[in-house]
């Protein structure tokens, strides 16, 4: 993607394109839908042998295909305390430096901006760790838990809908903190400092959804929406589905300094990643989360 095409995104009617794409992806048009799915599989070389149902004709809509489940055993989980939550590629990862998150050469954004302006939440992550993970069109588009977590809060932050591919990340300042996003705040079930998993929207990403809420957007009212769950005990186990993109995008994780001692030494920007592989090691003082003490996980709703 050239610099000109990146700059052209400022002029595109991104909201309208996204609404149109969301409508089209939800259509159930029989053989036409199947033909579109087959074309997409061929164009992006999607490996349908990993799908729970490898038959393109089994999906009534493009959204159903795009959010397809994996067959059992397709993504074994590492024994690491932090695992990769998605299939995709590493955009960037590393330390949060005095509250600043590295995006690309010459570009940073603040943790406060990413989480929707909550300076108190961001302060606890100011010298922690981050990982920005890009999901391409060919990838599996469900998001899973990188660690056991008790849900504290969810925030839908309105914003732009720029593309989130690597070229745009190099060309649009503060990209991930200016696009529409869903901020999910967790804590270890045994207690400890909160960590954050952010679903970042993009051009033609019709919707984002979580297993405890269902579709978060639409609607898109243009104002920040905030849900608190501290009066409930919603706990998700490591590796369980927590949400999905209806059309692809990016996940950004923020983890406190006290929770992570370092990243997988095989990780590097641009490297392909798979759900379940080791992402990071825990510090010696990270709270233990005995699986046997966790309550039953919540059922996934119909999206």
Image: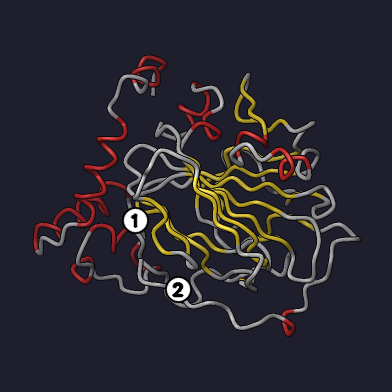
Q: Nearer the viewer, residue 189 or 33?
A: 189
Q: Nearer the viewer, residue 178 or 145?
A: 178
Q: Quadrant of the C terminus?
A: bottom left
Tell me the number on the disc at residue 300: 2
Q: Quadrant of the N terminus?
A: top left
Q: Which residue is mark 1?
A: 46
Q: Residue at x 37, y 74 (%)?
A: 52
| Disc 1 secondary structure class | loop
- The mark lying in front, picked from 2 and 1, is 2
Q: Residue at x 58, y 71 (%)?
A: 76
| Residue 194 location (% of width, % of height) | 73, 55
Tell me the number on the disc at residue 286: none
| Residue 42 location (% of width, % of height) | 25, 51
Q: Residue at x 49, y 48 (%)?
A: 225
| Residue 159 location (% of width, % of height) | 45, 34
- In this rendering, position of residue 184 left or right of residue 267: left
58 up-or-down from 178: above or below:
below
Q: Residue furthest right?
A: 284
Q: Residues within 10 Å of mark 2 (few under 14, many from 20)?
A: some
Q: Residues within 10 Å of mark 1 (few under 14, many from 20)?
A: some
Q: Nearer the viewer, residue 142 or 137?
A: 142
Q: Nearer the viewer, residue 2 or 33?
A: 33
Question: Tell me, what colour scheme is on the image?
Answer: secondary structure
Residue 161 image-quadrant placement: top left
Residue 236 image-quadrant placement: bottom right
């Amino acid at each position: 993607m050239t610099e000109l095409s990146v700059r052209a995104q400022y002029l595109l009617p991104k909201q309208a394109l996204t609404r149109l794409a969301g409508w089209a992806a939800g259509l159930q048009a029989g053989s036409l839908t199947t033909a579109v799915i087959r074309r997409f599989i061929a164009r992006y070389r999607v490996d349908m042998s990993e799908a729970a149902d490898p038959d393109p004709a089994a999906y009534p809509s493009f959204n159903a295909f795009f959010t397809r489940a994996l067959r059992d055993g397709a993504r074994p989980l590492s024994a690491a305390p932090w695992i990769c939550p998605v299939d995709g590629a590493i955009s960037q990862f590393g330390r949060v430096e005095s509250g600043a998150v590295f995006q690309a050469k010459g570009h940073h954004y603040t943790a406060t901006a990413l989480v929707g302006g909550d300076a108190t939440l961001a302060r606890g992550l100011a010298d922690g760790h981050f990982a920005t993970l890009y999901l391409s069109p060919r990838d599996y588009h469900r998001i899973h838990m990188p660690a056991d977590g008790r849900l504290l809060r969810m925030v839908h932050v309105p914003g732009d809908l720029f593309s989130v591919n690597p070229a745009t990340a190099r060309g649009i300042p503060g990209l991930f903190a200016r696009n529409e996003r869903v901020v999910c705040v967790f804590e270890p079930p045994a207690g400890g400092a909160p960590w954050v998993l952010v679903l970042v929207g993009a051009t033609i990403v019709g919707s984002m959804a979580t297993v405890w809420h269902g579709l978060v957007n639409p609607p898109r009212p243009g104002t920040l929406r905030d849900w608190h769950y501290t009066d409930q005990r919603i706990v998700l186990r490591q590796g369980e589905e927590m949400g999905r993109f209806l059309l692809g995008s990016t996940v950004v994780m923020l983890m406190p300094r006290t929770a992570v001692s370092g990243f997988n030494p095989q990780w590097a920007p641009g490297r392909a990643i798979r759900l379940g592989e080791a992402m990071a090691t825990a510090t010696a003082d990270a709270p233990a989360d005995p699986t046997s003490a966790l309550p039953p996980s919540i059922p996934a709703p119909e999206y």
